[in-house]
Amino acid sequence: MKLAKMSIAGSLESNDALITIQPVDKRGVELVIESIVEKQFKDRIEKAVRQVLKDYDIDGVYVRVQDRGALDCTLKARMEAAILRGKGDLQ
Amino acid sequence: MRRSLLFVPGNSPGMILNGCIFGADSVVFDLEDAVSTGEKDAARILVRNALKTLDYGNTERIVRINSLKTPYWMDDLNMIIPAGPDVIMPPKVQGDEDIHRIESYISGIEKDRGIPAGRIKLIPLIESALGVEKAFEIAVASKRITGIFLGGEDLTADIGAKRTKKGDEIFYSRSRIVIAAKAAGVSAIDTPYTDVNDEEGLIQDAVLARGMGFNGKAVISPRHVEHVNRVFTPTEEEIEYARRVLEATARGEKEGKGAVSLDGKMIDAPIVARAKQILEIAETLKGGRLR
């Protein structure tokens, strides 16, 4: 499923993450991760992000994660909020 | 057992993560005033995930939803109820009909999702003249109600009074809330002290609230938790006196005496009841059972 529009969720505060997602004209997921704990946790962040995209069946999307030490449950919450905003379901 | 209820903004992951480390008996994840209109959606998802994932140990998990007058409260409940909070705190409750609407909606979600009915409790926030006048009606409106909570800031705005640190303007409302709560057999929870830097003022305010019969007090700063817990915890002297009261009463009963005295004072039923309350709180704290 494609997103309807670009959207943002989260913040750059400590323990949070700012997620930017945008529909793109090709299949797959283009993922950019910038994290203060990138070396240790990049794989884990990627796994959390891809899990939420899979749960919502989102394809053809650019995702930028600016992580400030967010836990998995926070990353997933921010991803979910960004997706729902991008689909235009919630506000 | 709710000596302190610490409010945490529902859209702040750092504060949600640390909510249980300050020693508050309850943490209130706030989806209402602490969350801006444009972030209501993100906050309720974040709080839901926190409830499902983070271990708060013995700390009670309360979620303050948005008021019935907003378009948000049903979305709040749809998202939060399946995550299993201990308590929902609806704000600006004005009468029993508000409680019936909320309860009916929660019961519907429980039924749809196969969640055991009635486990999630309610602590209505009373913060208007009408709400104070209907405090008892609210307190007995549902079996889910486990406490009622006075909100002093909105209340004083509603009645056109100036909010002061001394709190004379809410004295009647405090009394009314305590009487209504005790008549209904639920907890009475006092309004928070809003000057986060005035710890002396906080302690005086908490002492006043405990003296009036409140069971606990809301706090808006982690720095206030320790002070409020201390004020609402029985002192060693109080515990010792309570033990002696019960010992004297038991001795009197054994000896077939109608009246018992301790330290030259008559021990009557209210003194025994208070002694039992003190020892119950002390036992609860000793056992680490805060709920």
Image (cartoon, helix red, strand yellow):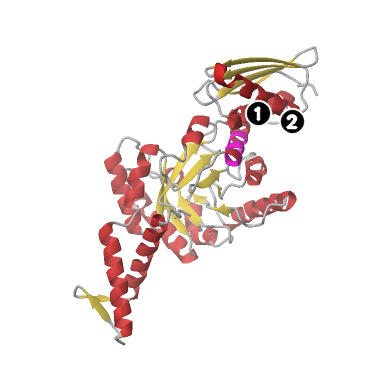
Q: Can residue A82 be seen in this snapshot?
A: no
- Nearest the viewer among B164 and A11 is A11
Residue drawn at x 36%, y 41% as measured from the top left:
B224
**Mark 1: which secondary structure?**
helix
Q: Which mark is residue A55?
A: 2
- Nearest the viewer among B287 and B179 is B287
**Relative vertical location of residue B105 with respect to residue A72 in this rendering, above or below:** below
Residue A42 percent across, percent down from the top left: 60, 19
**Relative vertical location of residue B63 with respect to residue B100 in this rendering, above or below:** above
- Farthest residue to the left: give it: B264
- Farthest residue to the front: give it: A40
Residue drawn at x 27%, y 64% as measured from the top left:
B240
Type of residue at label 1? Ala
**Relative vertical location of residue B20 with respect to residue B134 in this rendering, above or below:** above
Q: List the residue tagged with mark 1.
A: A81
**Mark 2: which secondary structure?**
helix
- Nearest the viewer among B151 and A1 is A1
| B65 lies left or right of B22 | right
Residue B18 percent across, percent down from the top left: 47, 35
| B120 lies left or right of B230 | right
Residue A18 percent across, percent down from the top left: 58, 21
Q: Can residue B290 be seen in this snapshot?
A: yes
Magenta region: which residues?
A: B45-52
Label 1 close to label 2 by CB (< 8 Å): no
How far separated are the C-alphas under marks 1 and 2?
13 Å
Residue B209 percent across, percent down from the top left: 35, 53
Q: Is B225 colored magenta in this rendering?
A: no
Q: Of helix, strand and loop, which mostly describes the magenta segment?
A: helix
